[in-house]
Image (cartoon, helix red, strand yellow):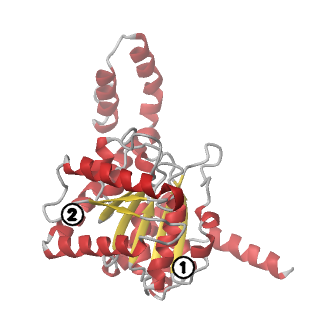
Amino acid sequence: MSGTEKKQAERRAYNRAAPDPGELAAGIRAGSRTALARAITLVESARADHQDIAQVLLADILPETGKAVRLGLSGAPGVGKSTFTEAFGQHLTGEGHKVAVLAIDPSSARTGGSILGDKTRMELLARDPNAFIRPSPSGGTLGGVARRTREAMLLTEAAGYDVVIVETVGVGQSETSVAEMVDMFLLLLSPGGGDELQGIKRGIMELADLVVVNKADGDLVPAARRAQMEYKAALHLMKPKSAVWTPSVLLASALKGEGLAEIWAAALDHHRKLSEAGELDRVRASQAKAWMWTEIREGLFAALKADKRAASLLPDLEADVAAGRATPTAAAKRLLALVLGEGKGS
């Protein structure tokens, strides 16, 4: 057996075996990238036994979490999210930080896997020993955030990464789920294209803690400055999320590495002001409660799908709703009563 075949056999044997949460936790604390990658794969697994092990692991490393600056990054396709993330990540590692990038890719409808492959689009950052990039499929989750992104964030923090960046799909879906897991939400925009505010929904602007106009270089500098002024005017019309922080609009050129220091300074200023006011702790506590309710909803939906009685009744309910013989609300209540009421309402 060749060396490559031996490694492949070892990898297959590892995947079949039940992971040891204690070993993974020790590896994560020691800064092992392999242990971190395997732990994230574990928490993303849909297998019930893997989920049980993952919860043991997360409980073990929980005291080492919460110390990182958590940044969310979103923007429309073509705005340069990956280029910006790579340049920004390199700027941070150059200052001595350890950066984890959780890049949420669109999911393949056929395999369920990631389509874009952010490691190939952030090649330089991927080779940086102080950076860790994890592309994960969104799985169709609202906001382009994988269901287990929160767990992956905790694992990277326990591994010693002091800046965690969640880069979302950014395809027009609701970004509320992103804002509910990070400290600061960055909205990346590009100059040009006529009226800068066209197509930018009020909702996502209200979520933004910092707006960054990217590609502010070359012939696009005048357009970028105009866009900056228009976005500033738009932000003035909106009520800030925090009493201690007013969102601003900055210019950047990821291609030339310009404006990155100012963006990081703004992120640190935001983190400091929220921490001093006690708001950061309140925000994270609220996020934890929202996470719990997300898990409750997902768990109830999974239990509903797995219930054999519900599966047998569902076709009749769907037919009644489609034919107008029952309202969707009445049909839903009947199904829930069957599953949650121990057979009542069947």
Q: Amino acid at mark 2?
A: Val
Crowding at mark 1 (Cα within 10 Å: few <14, some 14-19, many 20+): many
Q: Position of residue 233 (x, y in %)?
A: 25, 49
Residue 20 visible from this viewpoint: no
Q: Residue at x 55, y 80 (%)?
A: 33
Query: Compared to 175, does 44 lie above or below?
Result: below
- Between 202 and 161, the one nearer to me in the picture: 202
Query: Compared to 341, does 298 lie above or below?
Result: below
- Between 77 and 232, the one nearer to me in the picture: 232
Q: Residue at x 38, y 38 (%)?
A: 198
Q: Residue at x 25, y 70 (%)?
A: 270
Q: Position of residue 143 (x, y in %)?
A: 41, 48
Q: Position of residue 264 (x, y in %)?
A: 36, 74
Q: CA distance from mark 1 to mark 2?
A: 30 Å
Q: Amino acid at mark 1?
A: Ala
Residue 223 visible from this viewpoint: yes
When asked about the image quadrant of residue 287, the answer is bottom left
- Between 322 and 21, the one nearer to me in the picture: 322
- N-terminal-most mark, 1 or 2: 1
Q: Residue at x 29, y 57 (%)?
A: 292
- Between 49 and 270, the one nearer to me in the picture: 270
Secondary structure of the residue carrying numbered label 2: helix
Which residue bears the numbered disc 1?
35
Which residue bears the numbered disc 2?
283
